[in-house]
Structures are given as structure tokens and as C-alpha cells.
Amino acid sequence: MSKKLIVYIVFFTVLLGAFYYFLFKGTDNWKVKMPTLSYVKPFHFTNQDGQIVSDSNVYNKVTVVEYFFTTCKGICPKLNTNMKEVYMLYKDEPDFQIFSHTCNPETDSVPVLKRYADSLKVDTKKWIFLTGRKDSLYQMARGSYLLDDPKNNVEKIEDQFIHTQFFALVDRNGKIRGKIYDGLKALEVQQLKTDVGRLLKDK
């Protein structure tokens, strides 16, 4: 193949790429195609440093959400081992964060969450641990993040207990995107990593 022909091929490849870029830029066709499942409703919780975190902290960030409790000996250690993989992959991205809500606020006070966060050796500006009123925490799990099993008891708040293995993914506009990811399954955790990367690229 002659050098001149190679130059022509490269030129037309670049030209075609530029054509498609300007054709789709600024339209919905240019955006990441992932289902929207729900949206983040207003909330006010307290983080491991005693600071208020609200729904305003979700916007302009890509957020992974989970529910856990610090004394859990069952699925939670495995969930947070898998969550740490996601954290390690994106911890240097300025627009990435994780919200880990306690499902047992009676035990998981601010100091308890602080000790737990320190034990994981993570940057708590990126991986944020949240507590608050039980009814508010559970309302967010069900109404915003879709993380609770619909079969669970919802009659009396004192009798309720959300113990879920699922993660949710929130985009920069506060929309729950993609799917509800099973945090115990390697393939779904890998899919979550991929989808976080896609949303981070979608400005």
C-alpha cells in the first residue's frame, strides 16, 4: 500500500469521525443510553463527621448507593469488599462518590460510622457513611433507590429491617440509572464499574 493511499485513508477516517461528532453533539443521540429507574427525592442525613448531607450533594456527581450496618457478620463485609473495588477504581475522579447508608441507625451513630470508615482506610470525602432517622433512611431506600424487597414488612417502622445486597447508581442529575446491581455477584459489580465510567464521561 502506497504512502499516499494511507494518508487518504487516515484523512477520510478522521473526516468521518468529525462528521458524526458534530451530527450528534448536543442531541440525545450523543448521551449515554442507560434506563432511568427513579430519581433522588429530598433528604437530610448526617455523615461520619457529623456534617449534614442532603440531596443537593448528589447533583453534578456520579454516586453509588448502598445500605449496610456496621455490626453485620453476614453479607455486609462482602458487599463492602466489592464496593471497595469500585472505590479504588474511581477514587481519583473528582465527580465520583459513594453513599453508604446505615439500615440500623439505633446502633450506627456518628462516632460508630467514623470508626467503621477509618477501619476501611478510605477517603471519607469520596466514600461517605450516612445515618439519620430510621423512617427517613428507609423511605429513601424504597422510594428513591428501589433497594428494598417489596415483600418486607412496612407496617411499623420499629419492626422493619432493610438488609439488602443491592447497589444503586445515580447520575449527575439525581436520576437512578442502569439497573439495581447485585453487590454479591462479580459480573454485576463489574457491570457497575463499567456503568460508573460511562456516566462519568457523560458531561
Image (tube, helix red, strand yellow):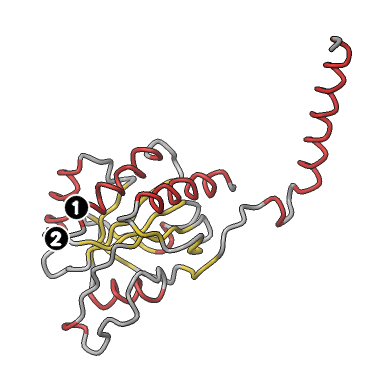
Element class at badge 2: loop
Across and down, in percent, residue 175 comes to 51, 64
Residue drawn at point x = 25 percent, y = 55 percent = 129
Distance between the alpha carbons at the discs numbered 2 and 1: 7 Å
- Residue projecting furthest to the bottom: 155
In the rendered image, residue 161, in percent from the top left (x then y), is placed at: 20, 75
Q: Quadrant of residue 14?
A: top right
Are the residues tagged 2 and 1 within 8 Å (C-beta)?
yes
Residue 196 relative to residue 128: left or right: right
> Residue at point 28% right, 57% down?
100
| Residue beneath disc 2 | 72
In the image, what residue type sits under mark 1?
Answer: Pro
| Image location (x, y in percent) of residue 137 | 28, 71
Kindly identify which numbered label has been placed on residue 77: 1
192 relative to 144, above or below: above
Left or right of residue 154, residue 37 in this image: right
Q: Position of residue 42 (x, y in %)?
A: 41, 71
